[in-house]
Amino acid sequence: MGQLKSLRTIVMFVFVVLYWVAFPLYFRNSNYHLGVVITASILSCISLGVWLTFSIGRINIGQGAFAAIGGYTTAILTMKLGASFWLCLPLSGIVSAFVGLLIGIPILRLKGVYFAMITLCMTEAVTLVFLNAEKLTQGASGIMNIPRPGALTIGTITIIPAYQAGHYLYFYYLAAFLLLLVLIGLWRLNVSRIGWIFRALRQSDTLALSIGINVVKYRLIAYGICCFIGGIGGSLFTVSMQNIFPTSFRVTDSMYFMLYCFLGGLDYLLGPVAGAFLLTGSFEALRVVQKYQEGIYACLMIALMLWLPNGILSLRFRKRALGKELKPEG
């Protein structure tokens, strides 16, 4: 057990050094490589919200809708009202959470495939709303040339400097810091009393209700946090791209957010992060064989799901389990 914990600590330390120091310094002049990791970091952040709804036993295929709401909130506030990105970022999460709670009150009573299908339709419905609300969203033309973040100051102290053209490292560390905040927040939530209640809901709603847990309340808490995370992720993605369209977050994106969780492992908080980085990286690596890219990608996905049904992070337990099987009795 001690060796496993030490190995886990070493792996985490190596990953942190690579992610925060080695990679950005080595590729500091390569906007392409930095852009890939920026995208993976933001997708990981949004997917962590989906992981949270899995923790209460609900299959969420509608996270793309709330990422779109967050993105459009930031785009409209910055373009039409001239609001600062640093104000729009939390506001986008709040607006997404508010919409999510309004929708969640009726749909969270549904279970299994019924809840999944409703959330699946939600992304398409939000796309149609943004497509037809031309006065606010510019319709199919989308909102272009969204301003990049200015400086974040408190009094006379500059906390975060303003973005400078061509400096992708700015968004790299911004996305990395946002991902770190979301991970820490969800980890604290997961090990708290509320986290235990969420796991009780995943096991059995009826059992949780029988011991006095307010099931509706905690479902709404989980779903509201999920939508908030989707909103801030969509906000950062929109500003990094400097544009947003009704099709920026589609049904397929919502399915990918769910897939990242399955691929990394639903039992692990880092599951969505591992899944998002693996799929984003493999997708970019397969660009060299564009003709067969989607076919190879699909085969890799099927193979991983068949041989690692508990996600790629479950690999770390295989050696330990094998050792127990081979250990002689007596």
Image (spheres, rainbow, N blue to C red):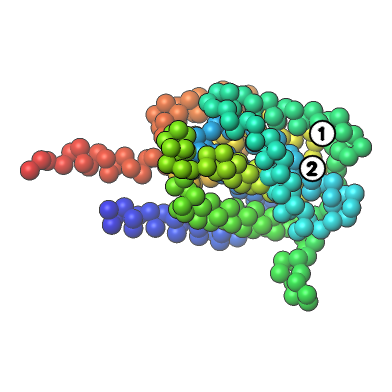
Residue 290 shows up from this direction: no
Residue 83 % position (x, y): 84, 56
Q: Is residue 199 above or below residue 256?
A: below
Query: What amino acid does circle 2 point to?
Result: Tyr
Judge by depth and name the residue closer to the eye, 72 or 30.
72
Q: Is residue 191 above or below residue 290?
A: below
Mark 2 is surrounded, within 10 Å at the Cα level, by few (under 14), some (14 to 19) or many (20 or more) other residues, namely many
- Residue at image position (81%, 58%) is 84
| Cβ atoms at labels 2 and 1 below 8 Å apart | yes
Residue 136 % position (x, y): 88, 39
Residue 5 shows up from this direction: yes
Report which quarter residue 321 is drawn in.
top left
Left or right of 179? Residue 5 is: left
Label ID, residue 107: none
Judge by depth and name the residue closer to the eye, 321 or 49.
49
Q: Which residue is mark 2?
A: 72
Residue 46 % position (x, y): 62, 43
Mark 1 is surrounded, within 10 Å at the Cα level, by few (under 14), some (14 to 19) or many (20 or more) other residues, namely many
- Residue at image position (69%, 35%) is 103
Secondary structure type for disc 1: helix
Judge by depth and name the residue closer to the eye, 94 or 78.
94
N-terminal-most mark, 2 or 1:
2
Label ID, residue 130: 1
Image quadrant occupied by the C terminus: top left
Residue found at the far left of this picture: 330
Q: Is residue 122 above or below residue 329?
A: above
Query: What amino acid does circle 1 point to?
Result: Phe
Report which quarter residue 141 is drawn in.
top right
Residue 59 % position (x, y): 55, 31
- Residue at image position (41%, 31%) is 309
Judge by depth and name the residue closer to the eye, 85 or 190.
190
